[in-house]
Amino acid sequence: MRALFFSTLGYFLTPLGLVVMAGLDASMVFFLPLGIDVVVIIMSARAPGLFWLYALLAALGSAAGAAGTFWIGRQAGEHGLTRFVSRRRLERVRRRVDRGAFVVAALALVPPPFPFTPFVLASGALGISPWSFLGSLALVRLFRFGAEAALASHYGSQILRWMKTPAFETMVGVLIALAVAGTVVSAVALARGSRRG
């Protein structure tokens, strides 16, 4: 299982791969809890001197991925949101979105399994300024990934040792199962929502 994880993850353990993983992580379809966080931590542990670059690339990729979700929300409009988000959840999301771009972007600090995508969709649909929202999101993500990268650069050798343990292998298996299941569910929901429109 560990070999499968690292052979798959290996594609993302490059600067370009990091940007791609961050973009996918912020999209509506791809689902891998803590996937981008793990990539930032591993890369920073392996090359501590570049931790700041990895945090910056992850923040930029995340903002780019969120921009696609934001645009889908903008195209769907307020009425079309119900194709992607249940009415009950939509009311909770709307109350937070009404507080402004920075409040919504600050929710990006909350780690999975917090469902951040509905907030990005609603921000687009409810007319929040894209520059204000995406700029705030990039700053919040830079803070989150910067803290993770700085800690990983400091504690890198311990992290890399822990990754060779059976506990890590078990965690990897759980994450892979969640990623596959979550991505399938997200893709099906997105396809159904598109057909209803």
Image (cartoon, rainbow, N blue to C red):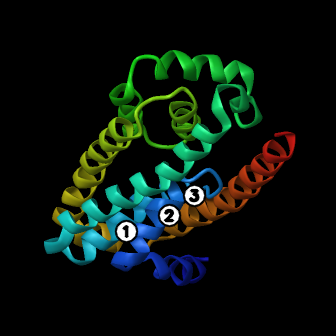
Q: Quadrant of residue 149?
A: bottom left
Q: Nearer the viewer, residue 108 or 155?
A: 108
From the viewer's perspective, is 13 left or right of 138?
A: right
- On the question of residue 164 being in view, the answer is no
* Res 167 label: 2
Check disc 2 and give the amino acid type. Ala
Q: Tell me which residue sits at (34%, 64%) in the image.
A: 40
User: In the displayed structure, would residue 98 be above or below residue 141?
Assistant: above
User: In the displayed structure, would residue 123 be above or below residue 5?
Assistant: above
Q: Separation of disc 3 and disc 2 at Cα?
A: 18 Å
* Res 32 label: 3
User: In the displayed structure, would residue 89 be above or below residue 6?
Assistant: above
Badge 3, how many Cα within 10 Å: few under 14, some, many 20+? many
From the viewer's perspective, is 149 left or right of 166?
A: left
* Res 7 label: none
Determine which residue is flagged by label 1.
162
Q: Are marks 3 and 1 in contact (CB under 8 Å)?
A: no
Check disc 3 and give the amino acid type. Leu
Residue 1 drawn at (x, y percent): 62, 77
Q: Tell me which residue sits at (76%, 35%) in the image.
A: 83
Q: Are marks 2 and 1 in contact (CB under 8 Å)?
A: yes
Give the mark toward the camera: 3 or 1: 3
